[in-house]
Amino acid sequence: MNIVYFVMTISSLILITAIAPESAFSIMLGGTKTAIELAIILVSIYAIWLSVLKIMEKIGANKLLYRMLRPVTKKLFKGESDMALQYISLNFSANLLGMGGAATPLGIKAMECMQDGTDKATDNMILFMVINSTSIQLLPATIIGMRAAAGSQSASDIILPSLVATTLSTLIGVILAKVFAKPNKPQSLPLRSLDE
Amino acid sequence: MSKYIIPVFIILIVVVGFCKKVNVFDCFVDGAKESITLVLSIFPFVCAILIAVELFSLSGLNIYFSKIFAPLLRLVGIPEELCELLVIRPLSGNGSVAMLENIYNTYGVDSYISRCASVIVGASETVFYIATVYFSTTKVKKLRYGLPISIFACYAGAIISCLLCRFM
């Protein structure tokens, strides 16, 4: 991350300094300003979802989702605690339904449950990150809305290709993550768990 | 149909909660409190990432980047008009939505390019944002093989998207 970040910032900065040095600092300020605006939006979104999550935990709805997704999560994330698997299930459900705002706080909580105290991400944490990065949304509602707003004849045409593409990219990600995972762990599971 | 998912879901949870004698008001107070702490802890990461993204996209470096990758993209069947979108997609969610809107306006919303772009954006995520924010409250500093795999899987998804748009 550090290397990617360094290369990206410094090469952009050098380029800006070469073309328009006076705008360099204001562009950086623009970035922080966007971050503050985003933070305010995120506080509002998370306030609602974390409240709903609190109620869900009290009525046991999280356990219900956990039990429903357990066959998949238990095989994918070997050796994780029930708590971690609960947050993983909730994160997956929110992602599947396209509630991105709800998925992020759940994902953060899941990561907290999975960490082993070192500064290296565990194999399971990476797998979780990969699944989240490749999107598992069933219905790209925002995009369909944008297409309809732009006057498309058939705004929902993209549902099927999106679903296939996102499923395949997640599969590729999961298989790769399992291949790269530490070899000392049992390795017969990836393909079997994906069949389900 | 999809616009009902969120409100109906929230109504369901709140009503069931109330019937099961959960203190709904307290839950919302706690949720709001927790949300501030959470955002405070992820803010530094978001801020750092957004400075880099802003620099990258406004310096014009993303256009150079796209030009370098254009031949490679053509090779795997992605229209070169989508280069810039592909470069910005893993970095910024808002950036890619803005670019998608732009593509709709330039090429027409029902064109092959626009459909490809829609599927690419719909079937991927903001990888760098996830990589930073999800780990922000843990001690983890080294993502090991996580980032390359995530990026690879996303771009594989983009290739598949363009392929599917040809006959779907």
Image (tube, rainbow, N blue to C red):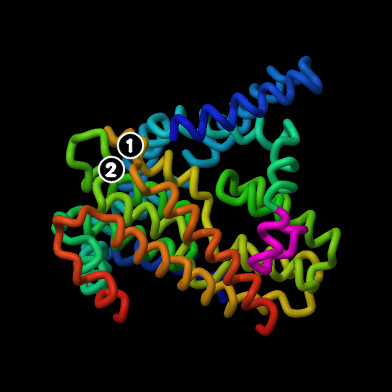
**Mark identifier at residue B79:** none
Magenta range is B70-82
* Percent x, y of residue A170: 43, 66
On the picture, is A32 further left or further right than A18? left
Does the magenta portion include B74? yes
Residue found at the far top of this picture? A22
Find numbered disc 2 in the image and state the secondary structure of the residue it sits on: loop
Query: Foreground: B131 or A43?
Result: B131
Find numbered disc 1 in the image and state the secondary structure of the residue it sits on: loop
* Percent x, y of residue A40: 53, 35
Query: Foreground: A11 or A50?
Result: A11
Query: Foreground: B43 or B82?
Result: B82
Q: Residue at x 66, y 83 (%)?
A: B168
Where is mark 2, residue-wise?
A: A121
* Percent x, y of residue A184: 14, 55
On the picture, is B33 further left or further right than B50? left
Q: Residue at x 79, y 65 (%)?
A: A150
Does the magenta portion include B69? no
As measured in the structure, the alpha-carbon distance from the residue carrying label 1 to the one carrying label 2 is 6 Å
Q: Name which residue type carries label 2.
A: Ala
* Percent x, y of residue A46: 43, 45
Chain letter of mark 2 equals A
Q: Quadrant of residue B18?
A: bottom left
Residue found at the far bottom of this picture? B167
Where is mark 1, residue-wise?
A: B142
In the rendered image, the quadrant that contains the N terminus of chain B is bottom right
Q: Quadrant of residue A11?
A: top right
Query: Foreground: A140 or B81?
Result: B81
Q: Quadrant of residue B31?
A: top left
Chain letter of mark 1 equals B
Q: Are marks 1 and 2 in contact (CB under 8 Å)?
A: yes
Q: Residue at x 45, y 32 (%)?
A: B45
